[in-house]
Amino acid sequence: MRNMCVCDDIAYLSPKMKIFELIDSNNSLLSIFSRLNIKLPFGDMSIEELCQRDGYSHELFIMLCRMHISSNYRPSHDEFSSEMLPQVIHYLRATHNYYIDYMLPHAEKHLEEILAYCDTLSNKQLRRFYGDYVRRIEEHLKQEEDTLFTAIDSGMSACRAQKFDLDMPHTDIDDRTSDIASLIIKYLPEEAPTQLRCAMLKDIYSLRDDLRRHAAVEMYLLKPLMDKFLKCDQQ
């Protein structure tokens, strides 16, 4: 029997694959179901049946799963269809909400638990670093919502949408993640429990990795869909 847990192998994903098999093969995909608010139970439903039930393109759903599993996967432009563009926007908006409503508050909860063990200086530094980190993420998400997504929704600003800079500030986000990690690992007082430090580190590294996947979806899925299906009549 083939090993379904080899994360680099994404060829096994197919429309007829059962949802339970999909999740069991890579449980990190649960976050996709969570952010899209896909209802359980699934029973023996296949990917194709689930997408038909919930109104998603199963081709797009499989692309998103493959991008989540493998950072090297690039969707084929030949498989794109016009219906995918609004569905990708829906997915990206849901991902923004997932960050704001779940991932960032989850990290902040662990932050507050750590701060209870910190002296005044460490408390101030960690709170400032984390606050800057959150503000940078929220500013980027708001810019996308207010500029890019609104332009695509309007159907009248194709040129403006196509000119939007989709480059996620990876270096900035990664640098801020490293700053927080360094402070937590190297400089917080030893009274701060290891378990709390590790929980906080896991939160910020998970968010960093998810933001990288988010940027990949924008660059290698949203952008080519915009180029292919948004007609720009202005010069």
Image (spheres, grey):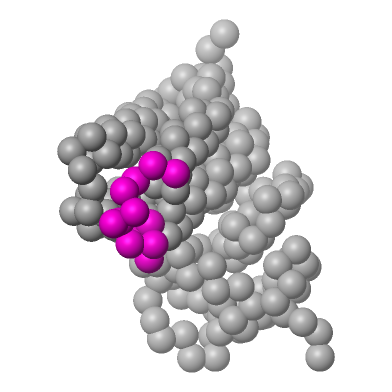
Which residue is nearer to you in this view: 45 or 201?
201
Residue 152 shown left or right of residue 165 in the figure: left
As for residue 192 lying within the magenta part, the answer is: yes
**213 or 207: nearer the eye?**
207
Q: Answer yes or no: is residue 187 visible.
A: yes
Identified at 43% across, 53% down, the residue is 201
Q: Judge left or right: residue 41 versus residue 29.
A: left
Position of the C terminus by quadrant: top right
- Image location (x, y in percent) of residue 61: 57, 62
Find residue 98 and report its horizontal and vertical position in percent: 35, 54
Q: Residue furthest right?
A: 1
State the residue lying farthest toward the top.
235
- Identify which residue is drawn at 48% across, 54% down: 206
229 in relation to 193, above or below: above
Q: Residue furthest front?
A: 190
Q: How many numbered dots are placed on residues in this image? A: 0
In this picture, which residue range is highlighted in magenta? 186-197
Is residue 150 among what the camera can see? no
User: Which residue is nearer to you in this view: 134 or 159?
Assistant: 134
Residue located 49% across and 38% down the image? 178
Q: Residue at x 39, y 42 (%)?
A: 187
Based on the displayed image, in which of its 4 quarters is residue 122 positioned? top left
The relative height of residue 58 versus residue 103 in the rendered view (above or below) is below
Q: Quadrant of the N terminus?
A: bottom right
Magenta-drawn stretch contains 141? no
In the shown orientation, is residue 12 left or right of residue 143? right
**Residue 44 horizontal/vertical position (percent):** 54, 91
- The quarter holding residue 102 reads bottom left
